[in-house]
Image: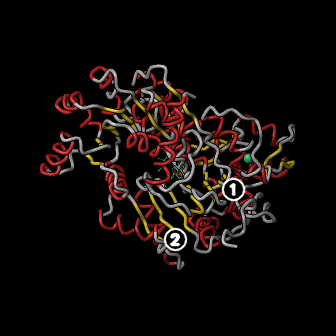
């Protein structure tokens, strides 16, 4: 390194200490900062919480000009500006939500070079009058946060973001820094291309979060599963993500009734209520937030001990971001997903019904990767890291499959019981009913249908409800049974089932994964 560089590094370190109160850089930060100060473009891939903001904040205050940060989230901009001001750094924001006086004041301060960091929305960044202004200032660099929003291959494409490449034309000598926490290979490629990053410095942090234990459970009686799970956590902080607003309210209420300090969170709730829920969660007054994906970006709570996915997310990117909110403090945390293959079928249909062909293809691909992770038979972390191109073949030792590898057993006899039961009820009934008949249930429906008189009634009474559920699902999975979606998911035998019924093949199935055997008993112990 040149003597000049050494001096710059020294200065950055001093400011890191003096302004931010941190004693050392985290992995990658210094190199990214130096690139910006050298006028070089960069692409920064760091997982959430790794410290992306510092990568632009620190060089911004240690260079002479103005730094512009483009961010898609108003609330995040506001938070960052407040934090900067509190540290004595002159920062401001411009977006459509401001009063004209506030905007005027900021513009004036900019004119008088009183601002070091300016946060703007992408809409504002693209306004011709604003670009003209920027051309008149001395700019240090432009940082683009959440850069994956640029890409149509990303999971959160925003059209205005897609146009940010235009800035390049008008500000040809200003270096760009693109930052994101989620980008698969296609998205990364798109970011480089759309922003026309020249010979960029690319920093890719490891996306591994070794303290997070990944677990997938069969979704069986989800509400009960979640309740039991939360109770075991003894008041540790957690988030439960689910796919609909209605469910967040129902689950939160049910948890409350069991004496758990829980609250729902979704986009439709009143602003004040959302704010107060967030505040209470941050202060540990609420233990569990039951939320849609609306809850997340910008939550800075280090001691979240678990994230439960009540429903399977639409992409590995979302799954990774959501689970990544757990264990920011580096202490053990857990990500549990409840998986029902029927949910997956339902989501696939929703995706197929979309008109936009491009979106349909993207979403299909992303969801099938997510589904593969849920159905994985090998280390979940391997699937995750490989998805983000962080190739590895070392099993992690801290996911359900590593800790408790699927146990296989000779299931021919039980498969025959299950298949013949499907046949005996006329191939007209869904999983739930088949299980009732197999276990010899005396429920009214079984009696009304006279299914207690079938030869298969009660032949499976030695095994649990969960067990048969799992066996039937696996038989579906393996192509011995299909579910007729048009007729209430009635089970029907396929050709392949005959050979099983005749005992001409062997069948191995996996032991059900319903109880969390791999889990710590309690986090607080
Ligand atoms: P990201 O934007 O990557 O999600 P943030 O920039 O919000 O992450 O940083 C996460 C947390 O880490 C913040 O509280 C930040 O102050 C802290 N942090 C960042 N860099 C350092 C560092 N070098 N030393 C200590 N803490 C840091
Ligand atoms: Zn593993």
Residue 366 seen from this side: no
Q: Which residue is mark 1?
A: 469
Q: Residue at x 67, y 71 (%)?
A: 442
Side (left or right) of 447 relative to 64: right
**Residue 187 spot, x, y in % from top left:** 49, 29
Side (left or right) of 131 relative to 157: left
Q: Element at badge 2?
A: loop
**Crowding near pointer 2: few (<14 within 10 Å), some, many (20+)?**
many
Q: Nearer the viewer, residue 407 or 486?
A: 407
Q: Is residue 37 depicted above or below 314 in this figure? A: above
Q: Element at badge 1?
A: helix
Q: Nearer the viewer, residue 40 or 93?
A: 40
Q: Residue at x 51, y 33 (%)?
A: 364
Q: CA distance from mark 1 to mark 2?
A: 32 Å
Q: Quadrant of the C terminus?
A: bottom right
Q: Nearer the viewer, residue 353 or 204?
A: 204
Question: In the image, which is nearer the foreground, mark 1 or mark 2?
Answer: 2
**Crowding near pointer 1: few (<14 within 10 Å), some, many (20+)?**
many
**Residue 226 spot, x, y in % from top left:** 59, 65
Q: Which residue is mark 2?
A: 287
Q: Quadrant of the N terminus?
A: top right
Q: Is mark 1 within 8 Å of ligand 2?
A: no
Residue 114 seen from this side: yes
Colouring mode (rainbow / by chain / secondary structure / one colour): secondary structure
Q: Nearer the viewer, residue 330 or 498?
A: 330
Q: Residue at x 53, y 54 (%)?
A: 325
């Amino acid at each position: 390194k040149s003597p000049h560089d050494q001096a710059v590094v020294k200065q950055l370190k001093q400011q890191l200490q003096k302004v931010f109160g941190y004693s050392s850089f985290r992995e990658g930060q210094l190199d990214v900062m130096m690139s910006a100060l050298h006028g070089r473009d960069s692409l920064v891939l760091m997982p959430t919480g790794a410290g992306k903001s510092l990568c632009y904040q620190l060089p911004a205050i240690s260079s002479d000009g103005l730094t512009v940060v483009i961010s898609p989230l108003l609330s995040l901009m506001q938070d960052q500006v407040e934090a900067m001001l509190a540290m004595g750094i002159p920062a401001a924001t411009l977006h459509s939500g401001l009063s004209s006086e506030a905007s005027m004041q900021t513009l004036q301060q900019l004119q008088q070079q009183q601002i070091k960091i300016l946060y703007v929305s992408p809409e504002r960044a693209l306004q011709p009058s604003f670009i003209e202004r920027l051309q008149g200032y001395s700019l240090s660099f432009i940082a683009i946060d959440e850069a994956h929003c640029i890409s149509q291959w990303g999971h959160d494409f925003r059209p205005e973001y897609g146009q940010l490449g235009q800035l390049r034309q008008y500000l040809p000598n200003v270096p760009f820094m693109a930052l994101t926490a989620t980008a698969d290979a296609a998205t990364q490629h798109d970011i480089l291309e759309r922003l026309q990053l020249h010979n960029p410095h690319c920093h890719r942090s490891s996306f591994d979060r070794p303290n997070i234990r990944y677990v997938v459970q069969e979704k069986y009686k989800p509400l009960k599963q979640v309740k039991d799970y939360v109770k075991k956590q003894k008041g540790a902080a957690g988030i439960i993500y689910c796919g609909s607003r209605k469910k967040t309210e129902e689950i939160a209420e049910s948890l409350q009734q069991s004496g758990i300090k829980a609250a729902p969170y979704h986009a439709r709730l009143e602003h004040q209520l959302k704010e107060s829920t967030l505040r209470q969660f941050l202060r540990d007054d609420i233990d569990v937030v039951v939320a849609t994906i609306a809850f997340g970006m910008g939550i800075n709570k280090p001691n979240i001990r678990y994230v439960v996915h009540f429903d399977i997310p639409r992409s590995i990117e979302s799954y990774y971001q959501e689970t990544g909110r757990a264990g920011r403090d580096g202490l053990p945390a857990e990500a549990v997903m409840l998986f029902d293959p029927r949910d997956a079928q339902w989501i696939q249909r929703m995706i197929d019904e979309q008109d936009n062909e491009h979106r349909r293809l993207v979403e299909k691909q992303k969801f099938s990767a997510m589904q593969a992770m849920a159905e994985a038979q090998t280390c979940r972390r391997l699937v995750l890291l490989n998805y983000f191109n962080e190739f590895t073949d070392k099993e992690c030792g801290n996911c359900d499959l590593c800790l408790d590898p699927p146990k296989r057993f000779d299931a021919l006899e039980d498969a025959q019981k299950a298949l013949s039961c499907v046949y005996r009820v006329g191939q007209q009934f869904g999983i739930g009913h088949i299980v009732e008949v197999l276990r010899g249930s005396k429920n009214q429906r079984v009696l009304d249908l006279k299914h207690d008189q079938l030869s298969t009634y009660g032949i499976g009474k030695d095994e649990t409800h969960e067990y048969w559920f799992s066996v039937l699902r696996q038989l579906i999975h393996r192509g011995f049974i299909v579910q007729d979606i048009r007729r209430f998911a009635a089970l029907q035998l396929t050709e392949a089932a005959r050979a099983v019924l005749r005992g001409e093949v062997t069948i191995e199935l996996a032991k059900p994964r319903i109880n969390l055997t791999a889990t710590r008993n309690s986090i607080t112990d």
